[in-house]
Image: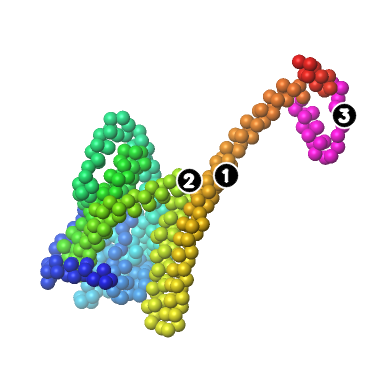
């Protein structure tokens, strides 16, 4: 894209000069979920839009929350003032912050008259934690249901139903995602099937690629009902960007093996240690983007000092990557990492089974003491005396028992 700008020229050629404004569009999942979610929390999208366009500098301009006459509903809290008519906030209309009210369902449960920025931030954090908790619970329940339900004939039926041509799999993945309007739902539902062995990894790849295409349709439909040509061009760029990625990575078998081998390698590493997924997520989605963002920001300063510093850092990063590849390939870095993961896993397993192993050893020592005829208390006393460096003669009774054991 940097060299040819093909996405820009392709989407520009597909666009009309202008488009008419239409009604807002929402998917079927949103129509089902929104009435319930709006009763709990409804975010004020005008805040981020006004900050992005420069109408306000920060969120403080929306606080404190003000409802006329103390009545918490859309009319008294979230209705906008008509500045052309001379209406003022607090007299003719209310004011809402990050949390707003809905015309149909009213104000949500976390809405509070007189709230400040800190109050709304706490409410948002609480809802985020609850949503993540519910997400994990639902995913665990989904896996449990699939494990119990997908047995015998149903497993074979699903396996045969998904064992289709790759292009058909892409179409199926796109169709499912367009229907539910979320690629996350598609991949979250299909991933447990792969873990259970119902769907092979080679079958999951085209379904995931199709989901990446289907998720762009939401933005495309939303842009088509607006009067902004730029929004439609961005949606088309999103669509053709994913299509270009599929053209590069899927049709050619050699290119297709790269993501499949990478997925299998990460799967094998995850079986060795549960630390692999969080490390992978942190490095790929946080460390590398922040590193590239920091390097690019140095060159964007357009000063000699920052440019020279950025150049040296780029050289250092390139040399560091080359050194890491050399260590990984030529100095058995992969084997060392796997051995480290195996040692950590063995240590964790040993610590988990240590109490049971100690009880087992104690029971064996007790059986040995009974077999030799040596009481446990005297055995413990002899061991303590031996550790102190002192030795005493064995009692005559113990000598007789030892002689009888030898004769037997």
Q: How dense is the environment of label 3, judged by Cα within 10 Å: few (below 14), some, or many (20 and up)?
A: few
Q: Main secondary structure of the magenta part?
A: helix
Q: Residue sitting at 26 percent across and 72 percent down?
A: 3
Q: Earlier in the sequence, mark 3 or mark 1?
A: 1
Q: Which residue is mark 1?
A: 347
In the image, 12: left or right of 48? left
Does the image show residue 34? no
Name the mark on residue 272.
2
Q: Which residues are magenta?
A: 375-397
- Separation of marks 2 and 1 at Cα, in angstroms: 12 Å
- Separation of marks 2 and 3 at Cα, in angstroms: 53 Å
Q: Position of residue 189 (x, y in %)?
A: 31, 45
Name the mark on residue 368.
none
- Which corner quadrant holds the C terminus? top right
Q: Residue sitting at 45 percent across and 82 percent down?
A: 305
Please, is residue 385 above or below residue 187 in the view? above
């Amino acid at each position: 894209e940097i060299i040819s700008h093909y996405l820009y020229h392709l989407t520009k050629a597909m666009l009309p000069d202008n488009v008419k404004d239409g009604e807002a569009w929402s998917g079927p999942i949103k129509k089902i979920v929104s009435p319930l979610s709006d009763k709990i929390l409804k975010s004020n999208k005008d805040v981020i839009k006004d900050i992005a366009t420069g109408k306000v500098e920060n969120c403080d301009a929306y606080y404190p929350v003000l409802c006329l006459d103390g009545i918490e509903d859309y009319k008294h809290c979230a209705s906008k003032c008509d500045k052309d008519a001379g209406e003022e906030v607090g007299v003719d209309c209310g004011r809402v912050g990050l949390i707003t009210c809905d015309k149909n369902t009213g104000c949500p449960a976390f809405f509070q008259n007189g709230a400040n920025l800190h109050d709304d931030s706490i409410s948002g954090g609480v809802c985020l934690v609850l949503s993540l908790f519910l997400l994990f619970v639902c995913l665990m329940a989904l896996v449990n249901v699939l494990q119990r339900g997908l047995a015998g004939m149903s497993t074979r039926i699903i396996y045969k139903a998904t064992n289709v041509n790759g292009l058909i799999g892409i179409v199926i993945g796109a169709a499912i995602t367009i229907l539910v309007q979320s690629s996350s739902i598609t991949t979250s539902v299909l991933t447990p099937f792969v873990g259970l062995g119902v769907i092979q990894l080679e079958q999951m790849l085209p379904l995931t690629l199709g989901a990446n295409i289907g998720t762009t349709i939401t933005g495309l439909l939303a842009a088509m009902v607006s009067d902004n040509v730029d929004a439609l061009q961005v949606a088309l760029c999103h669509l053709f960007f994913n299509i270009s990625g599929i053209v590069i990575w899927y049709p050619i078998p050699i290119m297709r093996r790269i993501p499949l081998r990478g997925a299998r390698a990460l799967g094998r590493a995850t079986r060795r240690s549960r630390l692999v997924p969080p490390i992978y997520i942190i490095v790929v989605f946080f460390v590398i983007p922040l590193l590239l963002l920091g390097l690019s920001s140095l060159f964007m300063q357009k000063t000699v000092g920052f440019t020279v510093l950025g150049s040296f850092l780029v050289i250092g990063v390139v040399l560091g990557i080359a050194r890491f590849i050399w260590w990984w390939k030529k100095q058995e870095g992969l084997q060392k990492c796997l051995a480290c993961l195996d040692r950590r896993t063995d240590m964790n397993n040993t610590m988990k089974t240590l109490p049971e192993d100690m009880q087992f050893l104690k029971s064996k020592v007790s059986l040995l003491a009974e077999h030799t005829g040596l009481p446990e208390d005297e055995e413990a006393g002899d061991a303590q005396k031996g550790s102190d460096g002192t030795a005493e003669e064995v009692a005559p009774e113990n000598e007789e028992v030892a002689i009888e054991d030898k004769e037997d």
